[in-house]
Image: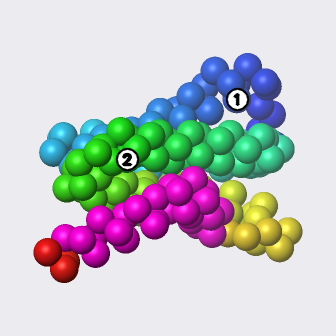
Amino acid sequence: MFIMSDDDYSQTYWPKLSQLIDLLFTQSEEAERSAISYEEMYSCVYKCVCSARGPQLKEDLMSAVQAHVCSMGQRALEKQHSPKDYIEVCLRAFLTFNQAASTLFAVFQYMNRVMLATSGEDSLMAMFKSIFVHQFVSPHLHKLIGEISVRVTA
């Protein structure tokens, strides 16, 4: 069995996964896609789960996703004075979130299968979507529908 120290987790494995999360949520569509080694990231998750770091990994993952979704919400609030910009920022946030969540679900699939599915917890994708709904959709839905309605009827 692989034994992972606190330092291994906090200085080697989590930083790699955190960097992936940051990249997925911040890289724009126009920017050239950085190479991401799916195998290396999946291996990090596998090693963390196998060495009993799964609960900490899950907590760190959810905190990182929530921080990025909150940041998306802030960017949308900054653009709410311009209906066109607001709608575009919200659409970009939706697309970015869906792409990031799909990639993260694939990378963290081992954790999802071994830890969550066997314990009866929601899947990672359900958790990601819940964060997005509560942190982004709920605060912006009413205004966004209003802005879209004005544009459609105009």
Name the quarter where the N terminus is drawn.
top right
Regarding residue 69, the answer to whether it shows in the image is yes
Placement of 9 over or under 93, stated as above or below = above
Q: Which residue is drawn at 73% across and 44% down?
A: 59
Q: Is the magenta stretch mostly helix, strand or loop?
A: helix
Q: Where is residue 114 in the image (x, y as percent from the top left)?
A: 75, 64
Q: Residue at x 79, y 68 (%)?
A: 121
Q: Alpha-carbon neighbours of circle 1 within 10 Å: few (<14), some, or many (≥20)?
A: some
Q: Earlier in the sequence, mark 1 or mark 2?
A: 1
Tell me, yes or no, whether the two marked residues, 1 and 2, touch with CB atoms within 8 Å.
no
Q: Where is residue 112 in the image (x, y as percent from the top left)?
A: 68, 63
Q: Residue at x 56, y 39 (%)?
A: 67
**Mark on residue 76?**
2
Regarding residue 132, the answer to whether it shows in the image is no
Q: Where is residue 136 in the image (x, y as percent from the top left)?
A: 51, 55
Q: Which numbered mark, 1 or 2, is in the foreground of this view? A: 2
Q: Mark 1 points at which residue?
A: 9
Residue type at the position of mark 2: Ala
- Give the left or right position of residue 74, taking residue 122 as reference: left
Looking at the rendered structure, the secondary structure element under dot 1 is: helix
First to last magenta residue range: 124-151
- Give the left or right position of residue 92, taking residue 53 as reference: left
Q: Is residue 140 magenta?
A: yes
Residue type at the position of mark 1: Tyr
* In-front residue for pair 138/69: 138
